[in-house]
Structure formats: structure tokens, C-alpha cells
Image: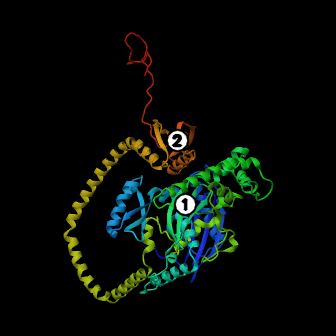
Amino acid sequence: MPQLKQCLGIDLGVHSVKIVEVAMQKRSVRVLRAATAPTGVQPGMPAEEVRNALVSTVKTLLKQEKFSARKAIFSLSGQKVFIRRFRLPLASPDRLQRIIQYEARQQIPFPLDKTSLQYQHREIPGEREVEVLLTAVRNDEVRDFMQVVRRCGVKAVAVSVTTFSLFNAQAFLAMDEEKVAQKIASLTAARKPGAKAKEAPPPEAEGSEEEEFSYQDVRAFVNLGASTCDLAIARIEDGEPNFGFARTVPLGGTELTRAIQKALKVERFHDAERIKTTSTSLAGAEPVEGELNEDAVGAMSKVAERMAGEIRRSIEFYMTQPDGVAVDSVVLSGGGAMLPGMDAHLEERLTTPTVILHEPPEGTALEWHEPAGSMAPYQVALGSALQGIGLGSLHVDFLPEEQKIIRDFPYKMAAALLAMVIGTVAVAANSGRDYAQKYEAEAQQVEMLVQRTAGSVRDFNELQNLHEEVATNFEHLERLWGDRNYWVERLTRIWQVKPAEVLIEDIRGGHEGEFRVTAQSPQEVSASNFVAALRNEFDEDVIRDGPTLTGMNQVEGGRWQFEISLEFRDKRNHLRVTPTPTPGQPGAPVRPGFPGRAPRF
């Protein structure tokens, strides 16, 4: 990926969109602009409406805040990405790639041919091993995400992961100004044609035992979003961050709001959200405004306990790894971190010092955009933007391959090709007179050839007429087959638009074009998403009165069972209703033993 001097980082959150624009300076990075805006997305909203809301919010924010850059990096939710870290023996690049592909087949829980696979590795000092960070995501997840990205009005130069972007932001803040200045100098030198990047100075040959000792600071970075909680653990040794662990928990601020809405029996989700942000707090902190709503706090505390439990289990899992150690501190970010008392609540439950970074720590090389306020909600967007200018520690990119080809095509090469084409045209114009004379002579020869082949042309026309007659017969056969193929085509299209988490139990069809689909899903919202997908797939001229969601109920195991009814207009019924003959009609059949009575059908 080409390194940019200026880049946007865009965090497409469910509750709000965050955008950060950064620019590389000589010895530091400056945040030119940072802004956020609510999306207006409500729980249970159809997927297409969610996408439209995200696109509209991004475009409005870019226009209102006057962001100047038009190249951006987006981040997929870590919940959709498979992440594994493991060690392998040191080997040649080709052999290492084959080993990693083998490990991927053993560990990734979905087919590799339907997966985008990324990995990066680093040699472990003092050992003949490499540490591999393997990431994978299903191709359909990337396609769904790109439906939003392509409509945002900016050029996507990469697609990262939220946990990695969170790590990149915090890892950059952990580096001192001198290390950042060295990296910027190396990147600047690499951009110059024919120039080589400066090599890092060699380590000193001698030193005391105290100088050889390196102190490790292990930090857990937690980003509390609306629908997920991202966790990234880093080992920071001598100012150099090393990735340790990542996990995304499907629990966030929306669950806090739902708990308040249910406890207070508030009809609108928006009203419950307002109560959460103004009249609640944790760990005895003061609310933002007004009096404390005790009932809301009680309902919200139960969900906050679950959050703390999930974070604690993730940290404990990391500590059980071969290179895992105790976490020294927790750094909170995201919109959920701004809830009064959230930092104190997690610190008490995790028994680990917990802080919120509202501004860059002293001694870092980041110049924050002060009008944006606290930098805590912008950590994922900031980490994405830092990757765009080449200062991210992790460089994972799930941008589709066709877009990578367009992005990486050298502009200088394109200019050279254009100059070559122009030169070719100029040469052709000068030599055109010579070819004109040759053309006249060849035209006379062609005319003589046409006269000799006139008979063959007549034969060809007769064959063409015969071909058209055969084609007409095949069209008749195709119309007959079309009715038989009707059900297969409809079932295939219904199956293709089905959300991945939905399990279809039964599909029944009637002779008039009616369908009834019975399915199960672990999420209630999947039923609405399935209905919306069917509505988008079939045109209004094809589908009649539907699709309609019926029979929604929860079954054993916490899964939701539902039915979807839909009816198609374009089904032709070839059944003919035969009137029941009466006894007096000539030729009316009579059942044996029942004289004078017509049979029933």
C-alpha cells in the first residue's frame, strides 16, 4: 500500500460515526480535524436502512467539517474477523508461507476458498522462531462492508480491523518523539526516487547489566462501543509496542440502554439513551446533569458487571498463554468510556489501574485537534489514519483484490504509457500517406474477392434461415421448461439472500406462486434482515403482498423461530378446473353400486 502524507480514518460505529484526519509533519503527526455524529440507527432496523444511515452520516460529516483528504482507511468489526497468534520455526519466506497456509487450514473455521487471509510475522530476538499474526475474514463479510464503503464519497485505500486500529493508536502514543521522528525520516527517505532509507544505528557493544535490563509495560486497551467491546493487549518494551492479544466482545452501550428501557418501561429507545447519558453513573460518580435515576442505574449496573466480567476473562486468558504476563494498566476509549464512573467501575472489578486518555500523554509526537474535545472516542479512527501514513504497527488490509490493483498501479507508469500512446499516434499520422496508397491497391483486390464469393454468400443466407428456424423451435422448448424451472430458480434466489446466521428448516410452495419459509436464528433481528433482503431481491412487479413475517417465537436453546410468507405474481397456473358432471348429461360416468350419482374428484 502506498504511504500517504495525509489520510482519513473512519470508524463506522452503530451509534455514531467518527472521522479523524491526520497529516505527517517532519518529526510528529498532526490531527487536522476530528469529528463525530450520531447515525440515528435503532435496534432491529433492517440492514439496508442501517447502511443508508451510515452513508448519509459520513457524507454529512465530511461536508460540514470540511475534511480536505479524500483517501481513507476503514475498519471491520473485530467480531467478524478470525485472529490467531502463534510461533513457528525460522524458515525461508517461501517455506514459511507454506507452513502458515497449512496452519490456516487447521485453525480457520470456514473454507479458505471463501476467505480473505492476511498474516504478518516478526523474528523473535535471541530465538530461531518467528511470531505470526494470522487474520482471516469471510469474503461475504467484506462484500457487505464494501457496500457501505463505496458509497461514502471517499476513496478507500485499505480496510483494517477495529482491534488492530485500536492497537495502532495506543502503540503510537506509547512511542517517544525521537522514535517517531526516526520512523518519519525513514518513510520520507523511502519516498524519494533512488534514495535508500536510513539504517538504524547499531546497538552498543558493551554495557552494564542495568543497561541490558529491559522493562516491559503490559497494557490492555479497551474500546467500549455501542454494539461491541474491543480489547487489544500490548507488551511495550523500551518504547516498542508488541502485539499480544485481541478479542471483540458482542456487548456494548446498546445493551446498557436496552436494560434501562426495559426497567423503566420507556417506549422509545432514544429516550432511554438520553436517560443513560444524562441521569446515570457508576461507582458513585456524579451524573452529567439533573438528578440520579436510581432505577436506571440499577438496571445498567447488571450489564456493566457483565462487561467487566468479559474483559477480566479475556485478560486472564492472555495471562495463561506461554508468553502471557499480568496486565499493568487498562486504557479506556470509545463512547462508553465517557459514561460517568465507568473507569472507576472497571478499575474496581479488574483490580487494575484504569485510565481514560482525554489528550495525548506528555512526550508523545501527536498534536491533537483541541476543538474536537476528548480524544477517547476517536481511538479506532485515529489508528486507521495512522496506518494510512505508514505509522501503524500492524498493517492488515482486507480491501478487495481488484481495488488493490487499481490503488497500487503506479501513476508514473500510467503517465509513461500515455506518452507512449501519444507518440505512437504522432508517428502513425506522419506515415499515414504511405499506407493510403497501399490501401487503395488492397481495396481493389478485396472487391474482386467479393464478386467471386457471391455464391457462397447465398448459401450462407440459406443456412442462416435454417438456423433461425431451429432457434424458434428451441424457444418453444424453453418456454415449456421455464414452468418446470420456476421453483428451482425461486428457491435458489431465496437461499442466496438468506443471512448467514439463519437456518432454513422448511420451504413450502403452492401452485399459485405462494411460498412459506420456516427458519431459525440465534438473533431476533435476523428475521427482519431476511425479510428486507427478500424485498430487495424481488421486484414489486414480481412479488405480491409481502414478504410478511409471522409466527415469531423463541424456542429451546434461546433461538428464534419464525415464518415468512410471500406470493409471486409471475406464476402461471396451468391447472384447469373440471366441472362435476350431472347424472342427466350424456356420457356422464356413474359409479358402480351408486346408480344415477356422479363421482366426486
Residue for badge 2: 566
Residue 552 visible, this orientation = no
Q: Secondary structure at mark 2?
A: strand
Q: Is residue 365 left or right of residue 279?
A: left
Residue for badge 1: 326
Q: Residue at x 72, y 58 (%)?
A: 340
Of all residues shown, which one is farthest toward the bottom?
Answer: 430
Instruction: Name which quarter of the figure residue 138 lies in.
Output: bottom left
Q: Disc 2 marks which amino acid?
A: Leu
Q: Is residue 579 left or right of residue 300?
A: left
Q: Residue at x 28, y 88 (%)?
A: 434
- Residue 371 vs residue 151, the one in the foreground: 371
Instruction: Name which quarter of the figure residue 429 lies in.
Output: bottom left
Residue 73 placement (x, y as % from top left):
53, 68
**What scheme was used to colour the molecule?**
rainbow
310 above or below 480?
A: below
Label 2 or label 1, whichever comes before in sequence order? 1
- Residue 130 vs residue 359, the one in the foreground: 130
Q: Is residue 490 left or right of residue 101?
A: right
Q: Secondary structure at mark 1?
A: loop
